[in-house]
Amino acid sequence: MIQTSNEAGPKDVIVQGSSPMSASSAPSNAKGGDSVMGVPPAAAQGTSAAQRGCNSKEGLFNIGFLVLMFVLFYFMLIRPQQKQQKERDAMLASLKKGDRVVTSGGLIGTITTMGDDVLTLEISDRVRVRVLRSAVVRKVEETKTKNEKTAKEK
């Protein structure tokens, strides 16, 4: 029941509840302000963060932090991965007959025939294996033996 009291002043409103609790025994929040069911009065009234005194710089700092994290992820993870993928695609596109390659399974062989997605590798004399083009990890550079190096120097 809501009553206005002439003793409290013409603009003051006194709210009387059905419980016999006095104003001194009513629950309040830890900061000393009145609360309704544990909700601070400012939040209960629907006031905004700016009206409650929250700093807008704090919100900008949080957004700036998220942007900084995205930039770090881009330059540390995404961009190097894209560069590595481009190099791999270029290597796979440049494969030709006679190249020595290593597969993801560890096989080393020479390309004898090529299809769109399948390569035939000769891993030993008259031993041929068909592998997917995507299974090729890298080309094997032909290393010159000691005898070939000394023959060129002479």
Image (spheres, rainbow, N blue to C red):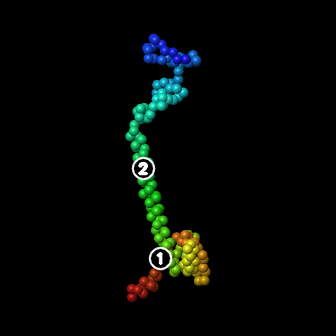
Q: Callout 2: 10 Å neighbours few (<14), some, many (20+)? A: few
Instruction: Look at the picture and state if 45 lies above or below 21.
Output: below
Q: Is mark 1 on a helix, strand or loop?
A: loop
Q: Where is residue 91 in the image (x, y as percent from the top left)?
A: 48, 72
Residue 106 in view here? no
What residue is drawn where x is 56% and y is 70%?
A: 135
Q: Where is residue 134 in the image (x, y as percent from the top left)?
A: 55, 69
Task: Identify the residue under disc 2.
Answer: 67
Left/right placement of residue 73 relative to residue 37 reads left
The CA span between labels 1 and 2 is 43 Å
Which label is found at residue 36? none
Residue type pointed to by label 2: Val
Q: Callout 1: 10 Å neighbours few (<14), some, many (20+)? A: few
Foreground of the two, 82 or 14:
14
Residue type pointed to by label 1: Glu
| Figure quadrant of the C terminus | bottom left
What residue is drawn where x is 46% and y is 66%?
A: 86
Foreground of the two, 27 or 145:
27
> Mark 1 or mark 2, which has the lower sequence index?
2
What residue is drawn where x is 46% and y is 82%?
A: 145
What residue is drawn where x is 46% and y is 79%?
A: 143
Nearest to the eye among marks 1 and 2: give it: 2
| Figure quadrant of the N terminus | top right
Task: Identify the residue under disc 1.
Answer: 141
Foreground of the two, 30 or 10:
10
Q: Position of residue 71 (x, y in %)?
A: 42, 53
